[in-house]
Image (spheres, grey):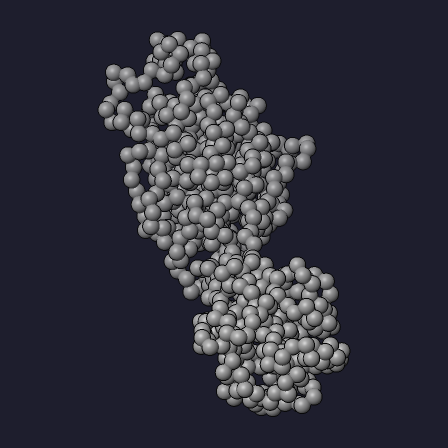
Amino acid sequence: MSTPTTATATLPPHYRHHHHPPPHHHHYPAYPTLSANSAPYRSVAPGAPNTLLPTPSSTSSTASTATVPNRQSQQQQQQPQQHQQQHQQPQHYHQHAAIAAAVAASAASSYTANPPYLANDVPSNGAVASVASARHLSTRTHSTPHSEAHYTNMSYTESQPRKRRRSKEPDWKQFYKNGLPKEIIVIDDTPEPEQKASAAATSRTYTNDTANGSTNKPPPRHVAKRRKKEGDGYDEAPYDARLNGSYNQPSNSGSASTDRTTSAYNTTAPTSLSSNGQYDYEAPQTGQKRKRTRQQIAQDAKRREVEALGDSFHEYQPPPKPIKKCGEVAVRTVNDRIHQAGVKIDDDDGHYIVVPDADLTTQYQIRKLLGQGTFGKVVEARDRKRSKLVAIKIIRAVQKYRDASRIELRVLQTLKANDAENRNRCIHLRDCFDFRGHICIVMDLLGSSVFDFLKSNNFVPFPNSQIQSFARQLLTSVAFLHDLNLIHTDLKPENILLCDSAYQTFTYNRRIPSSTNGTNRQATQRRVLLDTEIRLIDFGSATFDDEYHSSVVSTRHYRAPEIILGLGWSFPCDIWSIGCILVEFFTGDALFQTHDNLEHLAMMENVCDSRIDTHLVQTVNKSASRTSSSSPAKYFKRLKLDYPTAETTRASRRFVRNMKRLSDIIPATSPFLRLFLDLLQKIFVYDPAKRITARQALAHPWFREAAIPDDGTEALKIRLERMRDSEYHTSRVPIAV
């Protein structure tokens, strides 16, 4: 079988300029078929394969009959009428009128929206019209392959281009030695100044005489049998190799994909996309006309996230009723059979002394220390029984921390009982035991915390698309906790773990947004996570709403105003903490960086751009005496915040004064940011009764708005590409029999 041949017809540079004829050739009248709106003449390059040109056969050829069927019968019908016209007009005028008709029909092959055709010959496309007129001219004048030399001294009006003289006839036998070409690509590389949008496609592909840009109707058997009517346009579609079964031929227009990270393995620092830039998720295909709407972009963003996170875990589903509230969790005691006398196990504070590669019971082997806190230490260990790595939280050998750990075990057991699939992304309990006086809680081994990732990234903020993903997952986890009647009370970036800490480095080269006017930070690059899936951890402070509440909860920077004012706290305090976390994701720094209650409240008023509600201040004044040293009433005077005071330092005044309003921190420069700002304004509400809930926040329009394509969307493309490559290579691994 012969190799398919591909031919490309382009406009030669010679025909981009008009040639003016000598002044003595003006006795021929202007031709009405050549108007200013018609495209310039374009001839097929000599030697190029084209089914629209005649073959060496004297009567009819394979190529011509395949493209222009029944043309000879039409010519015979037109000959009587043509002989009558010869008696009415001079012979030389008639010959040149035929030439003008051929040139006009050839000009129509440039695919304008409404090309001018002859009244008696309206083909289905301009290229066929060119061949039909040329053959008609050959029949009338009995021209030979070199008959064009007869018209060398003839010219048209000064405004018309002159037909190029062909120096040599193509060797059609040599060209068709392998049979007819399987594909013809006609490229329009110089669009007309007044060209309409419907003819703006840069390439057009034909296979078996059928254009890939045809309408949705079934394609006709032959293109020439379908006659074009006035007003009909070409519905040109971009080239698609799947339709033609051949390789994708690039267009001469130079349009190519703008994806900077087409390969996840060859690109280490692709150019950053601004979070406020107007980039699309995918580069448009060559010849694509319509811009993708915001709704299409949102659907693509949701599709990508669903593909990464899983469809079943994308939308929040409340736990089934009735809620399973677990009681005390039994902790088995493991006897120490390997302890050597005289070897110290704990330090002076009751922390377990971690020794790499040491055994923590016969089932677990310590590998390294992951972190340390007030409660105890977290180590990475190997589970010999399941042959996998796990994280073990070793509680301090102090009674109050042992008691607190039993409450945490109860909460973890409740979470697992109501969400066996872990669709709500809370850490799950795998095992627990008591060893050497330390309660050990076994959980899945995850990546670093979000705070540690920010720290390693020099506190450069996350892309907006990833902030939205974090917010959806975090609100889903908190909504699940609240539906279980649980309050986390200690939400912060340190207690949000990444499932995978892999990242891609992007160039940044811009000023970092900040929550204060005095901060001016810049970065040249930033690390962008490939996977934004998270897990909520540290339920040691979690409290059931119908059980005992301590007076002070939450870490200072994420503490809600009702906790500072001593008004009591419940589910809304978690929502305030989420708002502080989201702003920190946007700026890279904690929003309220203070350790003083009065200064903290003053910063809140600056950020929210409003005073604390009067009825809340009245409640504070009624609940305690202003003279009490511990009463929050001392922070107010005449129902207003008493700041600054005589004891306030100059540094504190300057820091509070430089705090930006929330609308200045999150500029509403796009629909995405405007909705993000609206959600935060509903979160940062002083009155906890008026604050938005977790389930209401998940229904906010911001989660239906697609983020402007940024580094986060590019990183997601890289991750999905790696996932597909991994699945492809895994599927190609031979299976041992």
Rendered view: 257 above or below 398 = below
311 left or right of 508?
right
Residue shown at the point (65%, 69%) measured from the top left:
118
Residue shown at the point (70%, 88%) measured from the top left:
59
680 left or right of 654?
right
- The x and y percentages for residue 526 are 37, 50
Locate residue 462: give its quadrant: top left
505 left or right of 234?
left
The residue lying furthest to the left in this view is 650
Rendered view: 112 above or below 695 = below
Rendered view: 728 above or below 679 = below
Closer to us: 599 or 386: 599
Question: Is residue 153 visible to the viewer in this orientation of the structure?
Answer: yes
Residue shown at the point (38%, 14%) measured from the top left:
640
Closer to us: 641 or 199: 199
Closer to us: 619 or 26: 26
- The x and y percentages for residue 734 are 59, 72
Rendered view: 242 above or below 386 = below
Question: Is residue 557 visible to the viewer in this orientation of the structure?
Answer: no
State the quadrant of the N terminus: bottom right
- The x and y percentages for residue 524 are 32, 51
Residue shown at the point (42%, 36%) measured from the top left:
666
- The x and y percentages for residue 461 are 39, 43
State the quadrant of the C terminus: bottom right
